[in-house]
Amino acid sequence: MDGQNLLHLTPSTEGIAQAASLLAQGRLVAFPTETVYGLGADARDGRAVAAIYEAKGRPSFNPLIVHLPDAETARSYGLWSDTAETLANAFWPGPLSLVLPLRDGHGLSSLVTAGLDSVALRVPAHPAAQSLLRAFGGPVAAPSANPSGRISPTTAAHVREGLADNLAAILDAGGCSVGLESTIVGLIETPRMLRPGGVSREDIDAVLSVPLLDATDGTISAPGQLLSHYAPRAAVRLDVRVPASDEVFLGFGDMPCDLNLSPAADLHEAAAQLFDQLHKLDATGKPIAVSPIPAYGLGVAINDRLKRAAAPR
Ligand code: TXA
Ligand code: MG
């Protein structure tokens, strides 16, 4: 339990093998995905999964996403359906998680599902995540590799700042290209959007034959459950056109500001920059003002994260 012993690994053959062997020993390994860095543990090993909750200081009834190398492996954990097949074909590997009914004989620790009879499954596209999952050969439970309620990590340095003391190793492959967590779609009855993320609702609607419903009261609460989440230390103010003199200003589009999510007003670029720029502005210790971000495509997920960052706490 000290940052001194933290191994810094690169995604070389040797680095991947070492990371996989640490997972097999029940240790925690932070690894890159195209969305954010994950804090990984063997999803079958209850003690290892407990260490994730402990490291994040996470409310323990918040279930974790199980990461797998391909849809074929995913089928042995969740009950498959035509809709699951359609979504997996369209978006896996990639920034989409599917919540499916748990399959008998799944072998996952009940801590992963927080005792629910459903499970969130994801097949990440990042080559280092793919190599690690194949080398390990088992299901990897991984929340974002940040302390609960803090800004999500999109670089190995972010992970180190937040969690260094609780980790065996960080697999460092640079920045995350998507920069926002995966979109979560629930397939328990009719398909529902449980969390906006790296795949837009428009793209999902384009492949589904039924409309994607919103998460509603009475269904399992998905992420975001806690309103104040992704929170910088400083106060955050949204939809600001003219910042106050003591604020640092996060811009979007061509405008004067301290940091710009995307000078070209490209929502993909803005998503990829979001958490890194919030980390940087937070480090100034000043309150953060954010310019308006369009509310379509990936802008929905960006606004969702910003709203949580700005929520009273
Ligand atoms: O992009 C991502 O999804 C990242 C990377 C590391 O893969 N992971 C991530 O995990 O964002 P996390 O733990 O921060 O968010 C997972 C969310 C939880 O907030 C939880 O509410 C939801 O997934 N979830 C997991 N299992 C669920 C289930 N059975 N039903 C409903 N929601 C579930
Ligand atoms: Mg998270």
Image: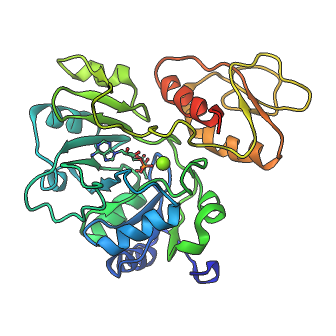
**Rendering colour mode:** rainbow
| Outermost left residue | 104
Q: Residue at x 26, y 63 (%)?
A: 139
Q: Whole-percent x and y of residue 271?
A: 56, 34
Q: Quadrant of the N terminus?
A: bottom right
Task: Judge left or right: residue 28 versus residue 188.
Answer: right
Direction from residue 81 to residue 298 in the image, left or right: right
Q: Is residue 148 above or below residue 221?
A: below
Q: Nearer the viewer, residue 76 or 214?
A: 214
Q: Quadrant of the C terminus?
A: top right
Q: Is residue 256 left or right of residue 60?
A: right
Give whichever of 106, 129 is nearer the camera: 106
Identify the residue at horizontal 24%, vertical 16% (top origin): 211
Instruction: Name the image quarter holding residue 242.
Output: top right
**For residue 301, side relative to residue 289 (left or right):** left
Q: Residue at x 30, y 59 (%)?
A: 112
- Please determine whether, in this image, residue 145 is positioned above or below residue 225: below
Instruction: Please provide percent x and percent y for residue 33.
Output: 44, 53
Image location (x, y in percent) of residue 50: 38, 68
Q: Residue at x 48, y 67 (%)?
A: 54
Between 196 and 263, the one lying in front of the other is 196
Q: Is residue 273 visible?
A: no
Total labels: the figure holds 0
Kindly indicate the quadrant of the structure image that contains residue 73.
bottom left
x%, y% of residue 273?
A: 62, 39
Q: Is residue 19 above or below residue 143?
A: below
In terms of image quadrants, where is residue 158? bottom right
> Is residue 74 visible in the rendered structure shown here?
yes
